Image (cartoon, rainbow, N blue to C red):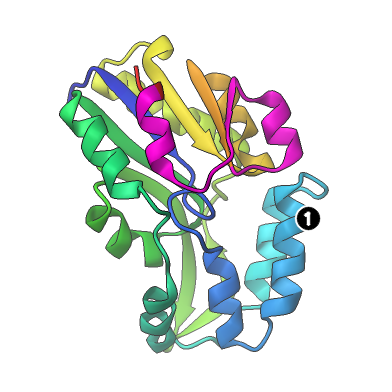
Amino acid sequence: MTARFLVVLDADSTLIRNEVIELIADEAGRGAEVAAATEAAMRGEIDFAESLRGRVRELAGVPLSSFSRVRARIEPTPGVTDLTSAIHARGGIVGVVSGGFHEILDDLAPTLGVDVWRANRLVARDGALTGEVDGAIVDAAAKADQLTAWADEAGVARHRTVAIGDGANDLEMIARAGLGIAFNAKPAVRRAANLTVGPVNLREIIPLLP
């Protein structure tokens, strides 16, 4: 896989409008508590990995059969397929690296024109979530390292990489990329990024592509 440039997006509140963990938590009747913890993590007020493990514990007992309802509630961000089509037309590739979950992203990403993706995996037993994450958490450092790995695999120089995100766990990949874009982002991300896009429409990114 070679490309002219690489664009890496966050998933929750960037590729899609939702925070997937909150949708899953709704299935357990714990949506409000998890939403508050997610907001604090995205503002950078608490450690992301510690917060995620705590939020995932709240999902214990959620049946895997409920994931079809979760998928049905997901709203792609306006302009997402316009952006991915424009990237491909210009010889680029699209990556998504997420603190969310493969259980949702594996079905969603190909429909939105994403070429490569990485996320966390949830542990399930007897048809229900155990409240655990399988393996190391995809945190801020992992996101930045994944951007570098995909760029190396595709022969893309660092100055031809773009990172797009909204939360504190996107700060390292935004700093690592040649162009870091804060998309409808928290204040700390807007301060750190090279550019800020306010309208919640990914078509706004197209003129900024390398």
Q: Is residue 127 left or right of residue 108?
A: right
Q: Is residue 188 magenta?
A: yes
Residue displayed at 48% across by 15% down: 178
Residue displayed at 43% across by 25% down: 162
Q: Which residues are magenta?
A: 184-207
Picture layout, residue 159 above or below residue 138: above
Q: Is residue 27 left or right of residue 87?
A: right
Picture layout, residue 17 above or below residue 191: below
Q: Is residue 154 magenta?
A: no
Mark 1 falls on what kind of element?
helix
Q: Amino acid at mark 1?
A: Ala
Residue on which disc 1 sits? 40
Q: Nearer the viewer, residue 26 or 181?
A: 181
Q: Is residue 107 left or right of residue 149?
A: left
Residue displayed at 37% across by 39% down: 203
Q: Nearer the viewer, residue 49 or 172?
A: 172
Q: Residues within 10 Å of mark 1 (few under 14, many from 20)?
A: some
* Residue 112 rendering spot, x and y as whole percentages: 27, 53
Residue displayed at 54% across by 29% down: 181
